[in-house]
Image (tube, rainbow, N blue to C red):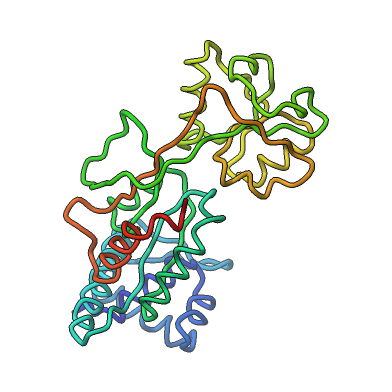
Amino acid sequence: MVDSRQLRYFAAVANRLNFTRAAEDLVIAQPALSQAIRQLERELGVTLFERNARGAVLTAPGEVLLRGAQRTLRELESTVDDVRSFAGQVTGRVRLGAWQSMEVRLPELLAAFRHQYPAVDVAVNELVSDAMLDAVRAGALDVAMVVQREHVPMTGLASQPFITEPYDLAVAESHALAQRTAVRLSELTDEPFVMHRPGSAVRDQILHACADAGFRPRIALETGEMSAARAFVAAGLGVTVLPRSSLASAGPAVRILTLRPRVQRTSILVWPQHGPRSAAARSFLEFARENKALLQ
């Protein structure tokens, strides 16, 4: 009979694809880990890993087991946390998805949450919106903060509007627009844009806003990092439109202009349709709703 210890050992090797590193993570001897995996393979009657000189590779049966093992271990952890909450203290871990620009504001909210729930850890994952929605559906994230978009399927998810934030234009200090305080989006028709990669809600919203202004932006560079976008702008490689909070640390080489007409985004909290899976996640969701002013 396969038990949770075997699944935990298997998942550790699958995540590392290396027995030595997985053993270090688990704080056990590498021979003991190898023996446990061989025993698991014998019990299941399949090969879970192909061993090679560089480590290990999951087989097809191994990939199937990994999906189930991750789900089972998450549910077990959530159940244990819920049972412990009967002792009067919420414990456990919250897996939170957040967009990159939240790195400026999120620490204050997390610090306040930690003060109220000292036994709950929060693991923050920075992902593009599409990936966060998929992760919440799959149970890999408990709660996500994503940008609200039209025509995006929300099957299996519940959501609530959270905070609203404007977008601003960033240009290099040597740019012709650098001495302005505001600019109309339609004035940027011929500008090279530094744009987020496909799948990003920021990209989708900016493309939509440009279309409303009557043009399609000329994309000179694409990046998945807001910090990289700011650096490209500072180097004079293009202009970019980003959430105001992400431009707070742009530096003296970048000038920030208000967009006319105003372009803004509404962020939403997203969680599984039938509610967060653990007491820790439920506590975080309620706390975030009540304290969203900390992110404004």
Between residue 292 and residue 240, name the one nearer to us.
292
One can see residue 61 in this view: no
182 relative to 119, above or below: above
Q: Residue furthest right?
A: 174
Residue 261 point in image, percent of width and height? 52, 22
Residue 88 point in image, percent of width and height? 22, 85
Between residue 160 and residue 191, name the one nearer to us.
160
Q: Is 74 situated left or right of 53 in this image?
A: left
Between residue 182 and residue 273, name the one nearer to us.
182
In which quadrant of the rendered image does the N terminus lie? bottom left
Residue 222 point in image, percent of width and height? 62, 34
Q: Is 8 situated left or right of 197 in this image?
A: left
- Total numbered badges shown on the rendered structure: 0
272 relative to 6, above or below: above
Q: Residue furthest top?
A: 214
Which residue is pictured at 79% across the width and 27% down the height? 175
One can see residue 94 in this view: yes
41 relative to 293, above or below: below
Q: Quadrant of residue 283?
A: bottom left
Which residue is pictured at 52% across the width and 10% down the height? 214
Residue 213 point in image, percent of width and height? 52, 14
Q: Quadrant of residue 291?
A: bottom left
Which residue is pictured at 32% across the width and 33% down the height? 152
Between residue 295 and residue 235, name the one nearer to us.
295
